[in-house]
Amino acid sequence: LAVQTDRKTQIVNVTEKVRQACRKLGVSEGILLVSVRHTTCAVCVNEDEAGLRHDFERLGETLLNPFRGNDGYHHDRIDDNAQAHLTSILLGHSSTLPLKDGQPVLGTWQSILLLEMDGPRPRTLDLAAIGD
């Protein structure tokens, strides 16, 4: 699935795209893996709420700035995006969900979210389903 981000740090709700793609997978009951191919973004399941989106935009900076030290991150000498890489390590590149009736099982407030940390960029999500 193609996803275009338009800001450096951004949450993109991809739930509907994933649901539409699941209709074509042909698996009714089983497990769905949603994975992102990029090292500066992540995938998670959480609530898509304005306050949380705002808080996410500050998350990497808040968590990782104390570790920068006097000489900064070494990777920043190459691409100036070490914080995005490290944040994606903490958040993870995939989520696994149960499939029922060919659709991901999500709670009332749960959405499948792509977390961009080095945009804007075109991103790719991969889906894999195992089951009957």
Image: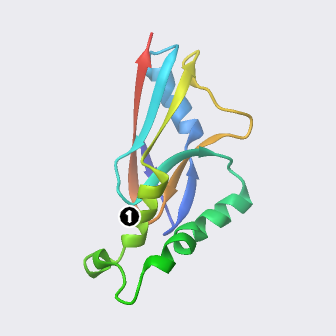
Circle 1 packing at 10 Å, graded few (<14), some (14-19), many (20+), is some
Disc 1 residue type?
Answer: His
Residue at image location 29% in from the left, 78% down from the top: 74
From this view, report whether residue 15 is shown above or below residue 65. Answer: above
Residue 4's image quarter?
Answer: bottom left
> Left or right: 104 with respect to 87?
right
Residue at image location 49% in from the left, 72% down from the top: 64
Residue 130's image quarter?
Answer: top left
From this view, report whether residue 95 is shown above or below residue 39. Answer: above
Provide the secondary structure element on which disc 1 rests: helix
Residue 98, x across and y down, in percent: 55, 24
Residue 94, x across and y down, in percent: 44, 42
Of the 4 image quadrants, the one containing the C terminus is top left
Residue 38, x across and y down, in percent: 35, 53
Which is nearer the eye, 107 or 11? 107
> Left or right: 6 with respect to 85?
right
- Disc tally is 1
Residue 43, x across and y down, in percent: 49, 47
Residue at image location 54% in from the left, 21% down from the top: 99
Which color scheme does this rendered protein use?
rainbow
Residue that sits furthest to the top in the current view = 132
Mark 1 — residue?
Answer: 85
Of the 4 image quadrants, the one containing the N terminus is top left
Residue that sits furthest to the left in the current view = 78
> Left or right: 79 with respect to 97?
left
> Left or right: 80 with respect to 64?
left
Residue that sits furthest to the bottom in the current view = 70
From this view, report whether residue 70 is shown above or below residue 124. Answer: below
Which is nearer the eye, 70 or 125? 70
Residue at image location 68% in from the left, 50% down from the top: 48
